[in-house]
Image (cartoon, rainbow, N blue to C red):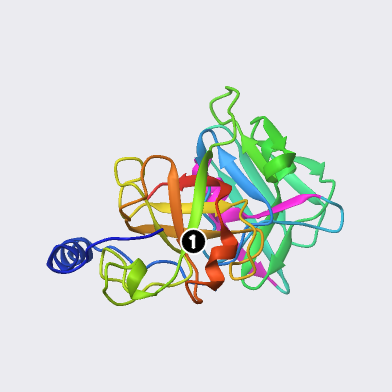
């Protein structure tokens, strides 16, 4: 289980990282990704709006986060209750309107299988259409609900690694006798994980899934590697979960998928 001596060293590391602009860990309100998108070998981050499958079973993605990875300049304008989006890069020009199936690719009118959507201030575009319009192949990994866009034209495997995972609580006995703070001085919370810094650098952003425990967001969650542990070595990860030390013993040892996100 999780043991670490925290104190002056932890405080010094915390102040150093905070001075460099490090942000607090994600908390429970960080939504899980029902559908994930990878461009080449990098999982795309969706901090405040998540991809989803629409009624036509098409993958809809927040347009800005994906198109920026594909090198597009994004412009939009409101037209009544609809949003007109214009995408341009050195190869293609794409125009589409939320709620409409018709779109333009390099001034040629085309019809999409499903329309773009405007929800909660975000425009979502069918990923399959974006892939076809950009001449970028897409493959679907059903086991992880992961769409992989091969911008470079090469075949890419899902960008995750399998880790052995345990769970720890805020009990002082699991925190070197100290309070409910991680190695960097942040309060422990959902999204805090302890890692071996030689495998996952401290401060890394992660997306983890594959665990099975009622105290964690169902499906998966964003996390920050901000804690360490004496027993956390190699490809092992310790997930903080609110609750008693005894209640977390039910977590046991589980195999999870860990996606490393760029900072």
Q: Nearer the viewer, residue 140 or 144?
A: 144
Q: Is residue 219 left or right of residue 254?
A: right
Please indicate, yes or no, whether residue 43 appears anywhere in the rendered image: no
The residue shown at (67%, 44%) is 144
**Residue at the extreme top of the image, as rendered:** 154
Percent of width and height locating residue 263: 37, 51
Query: To which residue does mark 1 refer?
Result: 167
Q: Is residue 220 magenta?
A: no
The residue shown at (39%, 66%) is 25
Question: Relative to residue 222, is residue 243 depicted above or below?
Answer: below
> Which quadrant is the N terminus positioned in?
bottom left
Asked which quadrant contains residue 110, the reply is top right
Q: Nearer the viewer, residue 4 or 67?
A: 4
Percent of width and height locating residue 123: 65, 62
Magenta region:
58-79
Question: Relative to residue 63, is residue 189 depicted above or below?
Answer: below
Asked which quadrant contains residue 18, the reply is bottom left
Please indicate, yes or no, whether residue 33 appears anywhere in the rendered image: yes
The residue shown at (60%, 23%) is 155
Label 1, residues with CA under 10 Å away: few <14, some 14-19, many ≥20:
many
Q: Is residue 74 magenta?
A: yes
Q: Is residue 167 left or right of residue 25?
A: right
Percent of width and height locating residue 250: 59, 64
């Amino acid at each position: 289980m999780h043991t670490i001596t925290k104190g002056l060293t932890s405080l010094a590391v915390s102040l150093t990282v905070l001075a460099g602009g490090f942000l607090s860990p994600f908390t429970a309100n960080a939504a899980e990704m029902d559908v994930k998108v990878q461009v080449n070998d990098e999982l795309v981050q969706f901090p405040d709006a998540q991809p989803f499958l629409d009624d036509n079973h098409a993958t809809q993605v927040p347009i800005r986060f994906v198109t920026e990875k594909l090198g597009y300049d994004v412009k939009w304008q409101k037209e009544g209750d609809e949003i007109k989006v214009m995408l341009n890069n050195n190869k293609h020009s794409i125009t589409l309107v939320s709620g409409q199936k018709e779109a333009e690719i390099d001034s040629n009118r085309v019809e999409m299988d499903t329309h773009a959507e405007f929800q909660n201030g975000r425009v979502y575009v069918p990923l399959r259409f974006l892939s076809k319009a950009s001449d970028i192949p897409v493959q679907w990994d059903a086991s992880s609900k992961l769409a992989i866009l091969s911008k470079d034209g090469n075949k890419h495997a899902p960008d995750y690694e399998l880790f052995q995972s345990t769970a720890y609580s805020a009990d002082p006995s699991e925190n070197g006798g100290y309070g409910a703070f991680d190695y960097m001085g942040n309060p422990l919370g959902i999204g805090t994980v302890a890692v071996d810094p030689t495998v996952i650098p401290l401060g890394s952003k992660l997306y983890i899934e594959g665990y099975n425990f009622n105290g964690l967001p169902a499906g998966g969650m964003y996390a920050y590697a901000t804690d360490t542990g004496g027993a956390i070595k190699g490809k092992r990860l310790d997930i903080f979960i609110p609750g008693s030390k005894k209640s977390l013993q039910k977590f046991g040892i589980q195999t999870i998928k860990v996606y490393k996100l760029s900072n």
